[in-house]
Image (cartoon, helix red, strand yellow):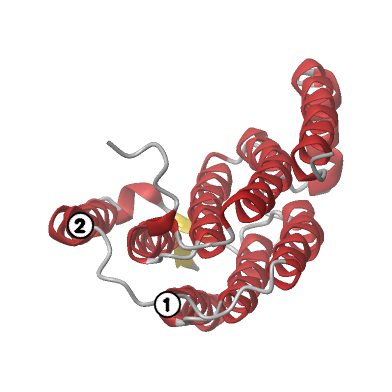
Amino acid sequence: MVPIAYYLILAAVLFCIGIGSFLIKRNIITIFMSIELMLNAVNLTFVAFAHQWKLVHGQIFVFFVMVVAAAEAAVGLAIIIAIFRARQTLNVDQINLMKN
Amino acid sequence: MQLVLFLIFAVLCVAGALNLLFQRHPINSALSLVVVMMSLAVIYWTLGAEFLAAAQVIVYAGAVMVLFVFVVMLLNAGEEERTTGSRAAYIAGIPGVAAILALLTYIFMHERAALGDATLGGSLNHTTSNITEISRVLFTELLLPFEVTSILILVAILGAVVLARKEQ
C-alpha cells in the first residue's frame, strides 16, 4: 500500500525539475527534453488519479498526451534542424532574431 | 513491499531527472531521460496501467528518445557553452519553482488520507483486463478524438518533412 499522495509528490518533483532545467539549460535540444520531462510528470498525475477514481478515462487521456507528444517531438525536432541550418548554432542565447 | 518498489523507482526517476539537469552534453541528458521514462513505466504498472506502461516504453523510451538521439547525432551537438543565462530566470524562476514544489508537497501531504492508497495489481477493474477496458472506452465513447489524433499525426509527419527538407 502506497499513498496516492506519494505518487503525486513524485510527479510534482519531476515537474519542478523539468521547469528548472527548462530555465537553466541553454541547449535547445535539452530544453526540448525538459518539456518532455514535464509532460511525463503530468502523465503520472493522470495515472495516479485514474487509479484513485477507478476509471480508465485518465489513462486514455495519458494515451492522447503520448500521441500528441510524439507529434510535437517530430515537428519540434524538424524545427530545431531548420534553425541549425539557418544559424549554425544550438545555443538559445544566439537565436535572438526577434529580440528587441 | 510495494512501498519499497515505489521508492526504488522513484529515487531512480528523480536521480535521472537531476542528471538531465546537471549533465552538459545533450546525449547524456537524453540517456538519463530514458532512465526516467523506463522508471515511470514501472510506476505506471504498479498503478494498474499495464497498457500505458507498455506504451511508455514503446512510444517514449523507444520512438521519441531515438528521435532525440538521432537529432543530437545528426547536428553533432557538443557540450553546451556555459553562459550566464537570463537573470530573470534565476531571480524569479528558481524561487518560484521552489515555492510551487513546497506548496504542492504541503497540499498532498495534508490531504494524504483523503487521497487514499494504491494497491498493486489489476486494481482498476477486477473483472476485465486493463487493455479491454481502455479499448472499450476508446473505441466507443472517444472514437472521434481517436480519429482526429490520426489526422494530427498525419499533419505532423507532413510538417516535419517540409520543415526538415533542404532548401532548393
What is the chain identity of the residue bearing mark 2?
A: B
Q: Amino acid at mark 1?
A: Leu
Residue A20 falls left or right of residue B20? left
The disc, 1 or 2, on the residue closer to the chain's N-terminal end is: 1
Which quarter of the image is occupied by the N terminus of chain B?
A: bottom right
Residue B114: % across, % down: 33, 47
Residue B91: % across, % down: 13, 58
Closer to the camera, B29 or A3? Answer: B29
Q: Is residue A83 above or below residue B66?
A: above
Tell me the quarter of the picture where residue A54 sits.
Answer: top right
Closer to the camera, B54 or A66? Answer: A66
Q: Which residue is mark 2?
A: B106
Q: Which residue is mark 1?
A: B18
Q: Is residue A92 above or below residue A78?
A: below
Q: Is residue A52 above or below residue B134?
A: below
Residue B127 seen: no
What is the chain identity of the residue bearing mark 1?
A: B
Label 1 secondary element: helix
